[in-house]
Image (cartoon, grey):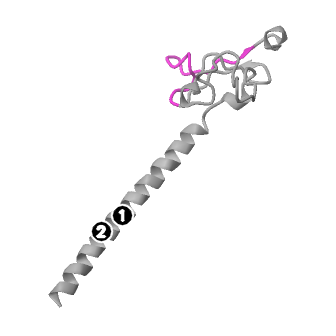
Amino acid sequence: MLHLVFCFSVWTVVATLLFWRSLTIFQQGINHLKRLHQVPCNNCAYFTGDYRLKCTVNPVLAMSEEAIGCRDFINKEGTRHNYNPQENCFGCSAIKKCHHIKIPEKTLSL
């Protein structure tokens, strides 16, 4: 009888640890996906959509986590908005305001 109690308690501890570990792995995956959804490259005017040259300005950083807060980001509508989710704006974290600068149409033509 003591043997069964010991086996059951060991099994319960192992199952609890496995469940806890799988829960933390799942939470880390959710956090990683949330971070990847902050990559602004899809909405950038320099994004080509071609797998060989994703971005004409920063081809190495395109579609990666390093592209979050890219200084060269220009919205497809022509608005430069350097947004960094960790701060209110990429270049103006000291004053906590975002800069929306209208870019001339000549600059957008590639």
Q: Nearer the viewer, residue 29 or 85?
A: 29
Classify mark 1: residues with Cα within 10 Å, few (<14), some (14-19) or many (20+).
few
Amino acid under label 2? Val
Residue at figure coordinates x 81%, y 10% from the top left: 104
Q: Residue 58: percent from the left, percent from the top? A: 63, 18
Q: Is 91 above or below relative to 5?
A: above
Q: Mark 1 points at which residue?
A: 18
Amino acid under label 1? Leu
Disc number placed over residue 14 in the picture, else none? 2
The N terminus lies in quadrant:
bottom left
- Determine which quarter of the picture holds residue 53: top right
**Magenta residues, dominant SS class:** loop
The C terminus lies in quadrant:
top right
Residue at figure coordinates x 33%, y 68% from the top left: 16
Task: Give the Cα distance between marks 2 and 1.
Answer: 6 Å
Q: Residue 30: percent from the left, percent from the top? A: 52, 49
Q: Residue 39: percent from the left, percent from the top? A: 61, 32
Secondary structure state at the residue bearing disc 2: helix
- Determine which quarter of the picture holds residue 36: top right
Q: Is 70 above or below relative to 5?
A: above
Q: What stretch is highlighted in magenta?
A: 86-102
Q: Do the residues labelled 2 and 1 touch (CB within 8 Å)?
A: yes
Q: In this view, does 38 lie to the left or right of 28?
A: right
Residue at figure coordinates x 75%, y 22% from the top left: 45
Classify mark 2: residues with Cα within 10 Å, few (<14), some (14-19) or many (20+).
few
Q: In this view, does 109 lie to the left or right of 57?
A: right
Q: Which of 26 and 82 is in front in this view?
A: 26
Q: Residue 14: percent from the left, percent from the top? A: 30, 68
Q: Is 70 above or below relative to 40?
A: above
Q: Residue furthest bottom?
A: 1
